[in-house]
Image (cartoon, grey):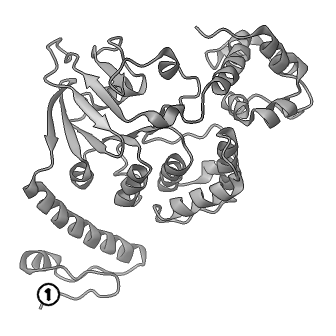
Amino acid sequence: MTLIPPDLATDLLVRRSIAELIAEYPYVENYFAAIRLDVMDPSRSVVEVLGDHPEEYFADYGLSKADFATSIVAFVEQVLSQGPDELGTITSLTLLPGHDKAGRPEACGLVVRAGEVTCIVGPTGSGKSRLLEDIECLAQGDTPTGRRVLVNGAEPSDEQRYDLGHRLVAQLTQNMNFVIDLPVGEFIVLHAESRDVPMPDEVATRVIECANTLAGEPINPATPVTQLSGGQSRALMIADTALLSASPIVLVDEIENAGIDRRKALDLLVGADKIVLMSTHDPILALLGDRRAVIENGAIRDVLDASDAELANLAFLTDLDEHLGALRERIRAGERIEEDLAAAFMTGPLRLRRGTPTPPG
């Protein structure tokens, strides 16, 4: 367990004002935002702000005043104790087999490396999300599957497992819920400052520009984050994770329905040399991965590498997806789709690009 030096705790909680605290440790502002704690008067100390709220207020978030105060100090202490390159050295994760929902031994494990995409496939309810959760918590036989996760071939340290800032693993889920309602530009700058990134304003601009290459609708930096569409939110978080997050492991849960350019999103994440695991039902995403783990009844049944025939089908599916994308753009533009699509599909290359609805001849 992490020991908190009394002097550091007193300095952070009592001696310094909130403004001084955030100026030196900008990432602690996220702690206040996470439970909507009012810091309108930044000249006060943490202890003074906590005193304004009844114990019941913290219970609504599963905390006590002591828990909240202690977690701020522990978080600061842990961030200060970590070197800047510590998280950049994760080159592989190894999943050692556990058991399925019936208690039978899992057929195989899995090794995933930096710069690779591993897709998780299987029916709804088969255990795809559980596998991602095992990786997120770096399970050590203490989850329902009994799996163990090794980092760079070794058992993870307590610091890696219980990192308060969740800096080892970033997760992109289907639902993006923002706990603070800042304009997009300010939100990304705040995140950049919490990561101690140099020139946070320039980095935020790059993140938003990158997100706009993924989303169908451009993101305005002045738009509050809670007013973004689902696709814009997902695009922003993918760009943020790729360009700003130091987390070397990225878990993605079904981005196919997010209304974004899936291939660009995947290229962006892998280009950052991260370990990417993605739950998906999308055939194009599944074939784009370096391999796919097949989940059945809560366990990995098989691990498949893409065959030559599958890669040939990927080219066809990608071409077909581009044509469907062109049709979506025409629908958005208010055009009619009246050419014989079935005949075009059966007789040769489709020519369905926007503005050129040419039937096969």
Please report the residue visible at 21 percent of the width from the left and 26 percent of the height from the top.
109
Looking at the rendered image, the quarter that the N terminus falls into is top right
User: Which residue carries the number 1 mark?
Assistant: 360
Residue at the extreme right? 43
Count of all numbered marks drawn on residues in the image: 1
Q: Secondary structure at mark 1?
A: loop
Q: Is residue 137 placed above or below 320 in the rendered structure?
A: above
**Relative to 261, 131 lies left or right:** left
Name the amino acid, label 1.
Answer: Pro
The location of residue 348, given as percent across then percent down, is 10, 80
Q: Is residue 326 placed above or below 148 in the rendered structure?
A: below
Q: Is residue 40 placed above or below 11 in the rendered structure?
A: below
Please report the residue visible at 20 percent of the width from the left and 16 percent of the height from the top.
99
**Relative to 10, 232 lies left or right:** left
**Relative to 111, 355 lies left or right:** right
The location of residue 192, given as percent across then percent down, is 65, 46
Q: As rendered, which of 26 and 85 lies closer to the eye?
A: 85
Residue 119: image quadrant is top left
Determine if residue 323 is in view: yes
Looking at the rendered image, the quarter that the C terminus falls into is bottom left
Determine if residue 47 is in view: no
Q: As rendered, which of 68 and 304 lies closer to the eye?
A: 304
The location of residue 149, given as percent across then percent down, is 33, 22
How many residues crowd mark 1 within 10 Å: few (<14), some (14–19), many (20+)? some
